[in-house]
Image: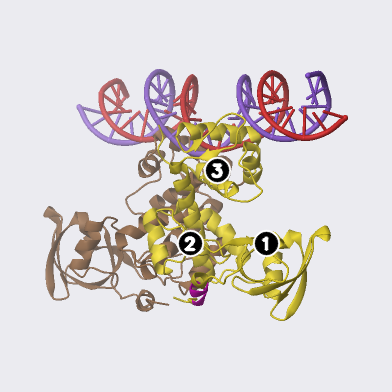
Chain colours: A brown, B yellow, C red, D purple
DNA sequence: TTTAAAATTTAAGCTAACTTAAATTATATT
DNA sequence: AATATAATTTAAGTTAGCTTAAATTTTAAA
């Protein structure tokens, strides 16, 4: 009857949560396994264990569903991850592709006490540098409810603001930086070429032709999110 | 042939290093076990494993000795620990009794890359808030070589400065704070009562009668360490 | 609707890091 | 120098978190 939560468990719950909240993804054991780099057998095994601890509901051959307790834990880990990313970027000046790697470790070894000091120090941010929302200490998102959609599904002619950049490697962020694709950048859809899966956009007077590989990782919203804008301005607290 | 270093290994090496460098302590398996809260059997087991990995020299029934590789690892962990303590105290304002607990976790999940950014951010400190020296990235201490000794062994009539406070709980630091026993405080030995293991000292015009339980945890030096003083002044970088 | 392919589960086994209990070796004392 | 005590080591066993391989179930296609 071990009550302590392990890194493996935290990562498992986090992955189930993330997959469950990503469009076009599912929470079947195999999907979770692939995401975590473990075998299907290990994922099934873990699912049964976590089910016994009431952290998720598991029925053979079905998708995994977090219980409210499991979801709360997942959100706790996500909170720590995103607060650390914000911190590492703002305070230590780590670049976008570096912060995830470090936060991935730190998130598991930060007490709730320290988490709140971190959040306080940062001025209780509600989004991280990628534009991802940060839940509060009780697992609630306070980001307003602006409609967001992947750039790959944006409408021709419309104007949007970038709300999230979901890539991870240096090249991705270098490219985005280079082309002014930043959180809160204004972006207009010039043309869509669905057959070629390309989208032509305008950012800061410049035209870009982007493939769906990229446009599916950029989340945009029609109205500029004033909350996020507010947060971006407070760089050195 | 697992090349990754585990938390258990890091803590084991750190403990052997610390015991080996504390006067009146030894590095026998039982001592290490007690320190880590594991059984003797587990300590012996670990000693053999680490010996196989060339991190320490182990001969049955003898004290444990770190190899240079093992010592380097131990110093790496200690560096991370003390940098985090410095950070948490200076930047997040955590109190003395809180920083150890958090640093104890963070030290194991901080990459060398992040460690150097942390050190840079803090201005490459050479002592932590307890006055403990921080080794540099290659495991070298750059704290000058002021002679230090426990307050319990200080000489009657002499003046010293406090160089380290080695306690851990809130009560300890509250008492020290209350009585101006801080790193770099000036302290004069008025009287020693070896039979009762008490020492009478004067700090900021106030006289204190202290038991060896306390005086053995306070390290002092005859000459005020200008290096440490310099560091203490840079509070909010 | 049958069947082939894909996914999932079960079974058996491994390693790290522990445990308890028994056996061995050191050490300290008389 | 013999012996009691303390420390250490060995042996056997446990749990978490994996693995591979085989068996089973689902799903998708013919």
Magenta-drawn stretch contains B232: yes
Residue for badge 1: B169
Q: Position of residue C6 (x, y in %)?
A: 30, 33
Residue for badge 3: B12
Residue for badge 2: B83
Q: Quadrant of residue B115?
A: bottom left
Helix, strand or loop under label 3: helix
- Give the CA separation, mark 3 to mark 2: 20 Å
Label 3, residues with CA under 10 Å away: few <14, some 14-19, many ≥20: many
Q: Position of residue A48 (x, y in %)?
A: 52, 37
- Give the CA separation, mark 2 to mark 1: 19 Å
Of residues A98 and A195, the one drawn nearer to the viewer in this rendering? A98
| Left or right of residue A217: residue B43 | right
Query: Between disc 2 and disc 1, whose residue precedes?
Result: 2
Q: In the picture shown, does residue A224 fall above or below A107?
A: below
* Main secondary structure found in the magenta portion: helix
Of residues A138 and A106, the one drawn nearer to the viewer in this rendering? A106
Q: In the picture shown, does residue A160 fall above or below D11?
A: below
Residue at horizontal 50 percent and vertical 54 percent from the top: B78
Locate the C terminus of chain A and report the quarter of the image it occupies.
Answer: bottom left
Q: Would residue A133 be visible to someone looking at this image?
A: no
| Left or right of residue B73: residue A35 | left
Q: Which residues are magenta?
A: B229-233
Residues indicated by labels 3 and 2 sit on the same polypeptide chain: yes
Residue at horizontal 52 percent and vertical 70 percent from the top: B228
Label 1, residues with CA under 10 Å away: few <14, some 14-19, many ≥20: few
């Amino acid at each position: 009857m071990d009550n302590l939560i392990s890194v493996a468990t935290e990562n498992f719950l986090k992955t189930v949560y993330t997959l469950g909240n990503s469009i076009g993804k599912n929470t079947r054991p195999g999907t979770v396994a692939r995401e975590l780099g473990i075998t299907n057998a290990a994922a099934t095994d873990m699912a049964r264990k976590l089910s016994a601890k009431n952290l998720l509901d598991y029925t053979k051959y079905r998708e995994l569903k977090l219980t409210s307790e499991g979801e709360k834990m997942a959100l706790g880990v996500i909170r720590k991850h995103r607060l650390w990313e914000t911190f590492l970027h703002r305070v230590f000046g780590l670049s976008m592709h570096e912060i995830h790697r470090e936060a991935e470790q730190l998130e598991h070894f930060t007490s709730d006490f320290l988490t709140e000091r971190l959040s306080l120090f940062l001025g209780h941010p509600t989004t991280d540098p990628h534009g991802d929302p940060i839940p509060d200490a009780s697992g609630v998102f306070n980001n307003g409810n602006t409609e967001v959609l992947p750039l790959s599904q944006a409408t021709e002619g419309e104007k949007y603001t970038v709300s999230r950049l979901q890539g991870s490697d240096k090249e991705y962020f270098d490219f985005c930086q280079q082309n002014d694709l930043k959180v809160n950048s204004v972006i207009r859809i010039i043309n869509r070429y669905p057959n070629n899966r390309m989208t032509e956009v305008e950012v800061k007077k410049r035209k870009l032709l982007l493939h769906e590989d990229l446009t599916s990782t950029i989340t945009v919203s029609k109205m500029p999110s004033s909350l996020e804008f507010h947060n971006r301005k407070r760089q050195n607290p």
